[in-house]
Amino acid sequence: MFQYVRIDDAVLPALLDMFDRLGEGSQVLTADSPHPLVRHGTMGQLTLIRRGHGYITIAGHHQTIGPGDLFIMAPGCPHAFRCLDGELELGHWHWPQELLDTDREILEPAFAFAADGAETAR
C-alpha cells in the first residue's frame, strides 16, 4: 500500500528541484496545524519531507519523519502528518493530477497521534 525510501543527501537537491517543477507547491505545517487522517480513492501520492521534523501515520504504521524521507502511496492508503515543532515542510505530487481537487476523503478530522510519541519504523 506504501513504500518508504530514505533519499541520500547527495540526491536530495535534485529531487527537491523535481518536486518544485511538478507544480503542486509545498505544504507547511506547524504544531498547531490540523492533522486529518485522509485517503485518496483513485489518486496515488508521493510525499517528500523537505525540511523540519514530525510524525506520519500511514496505513497503520507510525514513524518520525525528517528531511529526505519519501513516501510512495497507492490509492486508498490512509495517511496523516503532524509537525513536531517549528515548521514541517512537505512536497506532494498526486497522480492523476486532474483529480487533485476532488479525490480526498477525510477519515478522521483530527487524527490522534499516540501521545505525540510516534514509533520509529525505520
Image: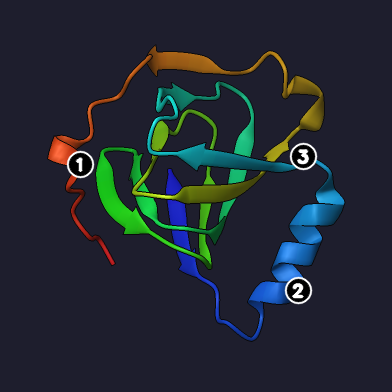
Q: Which residue is mark 1?
A: 116
Q: Amino acid at mark 1?
A: Asp
- For label 2, the SS is helix
Q: Residues within 10 Å of mark 3 (few under 14, many from 20)?
A: some
- Place of residue 78 in the rendered image (x, y in percent of width and height, measured from the top left): 40, 30
Q: Which residue is mark 2?
A: 14
Q: Which residue occupies 72% across, 36% down? A: 95
Q: Which residue is mark 3?
A: 24
Q: Amino acid at mark 2?
A: Ala
Side of 121 where 53 appears, left or right: right
Count of residue discs: 3
In the image, farthest residue toward the left: 115
Q: Residues within 10 Å of mark 1 (few under 14, many from 20)?
A: few
* Disc 1 and disc 3 in contact, CB within 8 angstroms: no
In the image, farthest residue toward the front: 86
Q: Amino acid at mark 3?
A: Glu
